[in-house]
Image (cartoon, grey):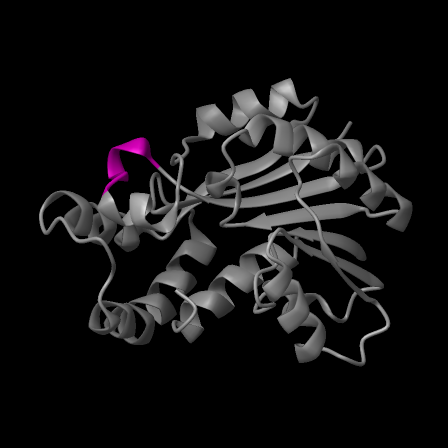
Amino acid sequence: MAEAKNYFAWQGRLVTRELGRRVVEVGCGLGNFTRLLLDREAVIALDVEPACVDRLRLRYPDQPNLHALICDVGTPAFAEVASYRPDSCVCLNVLEHIEDDGAALRHMAAVLAPGGTIVLLVPAFPSLYGAIDRKLGHYRRYRRGSIQKLATAAGLRIRKAHYVNLLGFFGWWANSHIFRREAQSQRQIEIFDRWVVPIQSRLERLLAPPFGQSLLAVLERP
């Protein structure tokens, strides 16, 4: 949903307030979210695609606190990130693209000192999985219970875990199971971003919904 400015700003507010001063961004892509982290002491932005890392470096050329690296969180080479002394990791709509998500989470935990934080935003509810997910390269969708199992196996504890985007749940279900779409239409994105997000984001700030399109989890290394 890169075109959805209100939605992206909403995600950014949810995530950035949970992060520390030295942040590892796993799966930085072209750097849309990286921009929101540039006021930190250090940002270690990683992606497996060299073209994305090159674009990121060109996009933010004069940022001495930005370290853009070609790196796969699922490989042993990720351990070298510990040399930057990160206090937090963020994985924003990326974990579902990784086949061995357990190994990825363990590797993130291993580069943090005790007290370090991992913030995940992932698509929620396996029942929503459909053609759009397959087209996007999603291996899975998550529930709070599945995140709890991953966290426990990685030696992490959950500080916070709640669903977000209540109305998006119904829209995604309809696209997947009624209309059988392989992608969201631009018109759908525009309507959702312009009319739904401003109201829904305020309401969910007051009360987390019992279910939603996505799941926000804040994990801590003891």
Q: Is residue 65 left or right of residue 184?
A: right
Give the x, y percent position of residue 190: 28, 74
Q: Is residue 126 left or right of residue 95?
A: left
Give the x, y percent position of residue 178: 9, 47
Residue at the spot 46% in from the left edge and 25% down from the top edge: 146
In this view, the residue farthest toward the left is 178
Looking at the image, residue 218 lies above or below residue 16: above
Give the x, y percent position of residue 169: 27, 48
Res. 29 in view: yes
Res. 20 in view: no
Front residue of this view, candidates 88 and 133: 133
Front residue of this view, candidates 201 and 191: 191
Looking at the image, residue 173 lies above or below residue 100: below
How many discs mark residues in the rendered view? 0
Residue at the spot 55% in from the left edge and 63% down from the top edge: 12
Looking at the image, residue 58 lies above or below residue 28: below
Magenta part of the protein: which range? Answer: 125-130
Front residue of this view, candidates 79 and 175: 79
Give the x, y percent position of residue 220: 71, 34
Q: Is residue 185 left or right of residue 166?
A: left
Query: Looking at the figure, which quarter contains the N terminus?
Result: bottom left
Is 90 contained in the magenta span? no
Give residue 102's quadrant in the image. Answer: top right
Residue at the spot 61% in from the left edge and 67% down from the top edge: 31
Residue at the spot 56% in from the left edge and 44% down from the top edge: 120
Query: Looking at the figure, which quarter contains the C terminus?
Result: top right
Give residue 127's quadrant in the image. Answer: top left
